[in-house]
Image: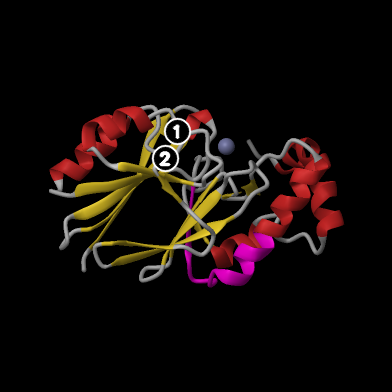
Amino acid sequence: MQLIFEQIRTGGDRNFGYLLADRDARRGILIDPSYTPETLVQRATDQHVSIECILNTHGHPDHINGNARAVELTGARVAAHPESPAFPDMPLADAQEIRVGALTLQILYVPGHCRDHVVVFETSHRLLVTGDLLFVGKVGGTENEEDARIEWNSLQRVLAAIPDAATVWPGHDYGVRPSSTMALEKATNPFLRCRDLEAFLQLKKDWPVFKRDHGLK
Ligand SMILES: [Zn+2]
């Protein structure tokens, strides 16, 4: 099996979409092909890959606004959490495994940033597509303290389940690099360095000041 894995800038607010495929099997998926779905579909076509599903990490408009066009171009199904406003015809459950050619994708349900959030872990090459749960150097925004608690629990699950060697591929280019590893994020991401929930909640409150003091954008 030969991997195809492309991180594609789709537009919007520094949004990333992804093409993930098995070149030998000529089968692949698109993840969050928003704003410019034609670009992602063309990359698949150029490599003779047929798209089996359009997978959404979560249902915020900047991640699903390309679904209709991507489906029109590929005939693929939409895979997302059942509560997604994208109304998936392939609902995803926690711990579900999806086969794409010889690739195995594990789904982890990680609410907090929103109710329908999932991350995707490709097991052979250890690729973790994190959507808006985990960015390089920060985590997804939350609307209230309860959601922040839920997000904390989701992050702890990911930290426990995903190996340090895994690479991290976020939904936006918000960090100082476009991708990372679990080991680097554990060592440098201030939200993952919080020793407990209280520190995490406090950092969320203090984030504008923290950003200013540390020269972050
Ligand atoms: Zn979002």
- Would residue 80 appear left or right of 111 to someone viewing this image? left
Q: Quadrant of ligand 1?
A: top right
Q: Which residues are magenta?
A: 155-170
Q: Nearer the viewer, residue 59 or 186?
A: 59
- Residues at circles 2 and 1 in contact by the CB criterion of under 8 Å: yes
- Would residue 17 appear left or right of 132 to someone viewing this image? left
In the rendered structure, which amino acid carries the disc numbered 1?
Ile
Looking at the figure, which quarter contains the N terminus?
bottom left
Is 122 situated above or below 151? below
Q: Nearer the viewer, residue 93 or 131?
A: 93
Instruction: State the residue position of label 2.
Output: 32
Q: Quadrant of residue 70?
A: top left
Instruction: State the residue position of label 1.
Output: 64
Dot 2 or dot 1: first in sequence order is 2
Q: Quadrant of residue 182?
A: bottom right
Give me the residue at 63% from left, 71% from top. 160
For the residue labelled by badge 2, is the local secondary structure a helix, a strand or a loop? loop
Q: Nearer the viewer, residue 59 or 125?
A: 59
Give me the residue at 39% from left, 27% from top. 35
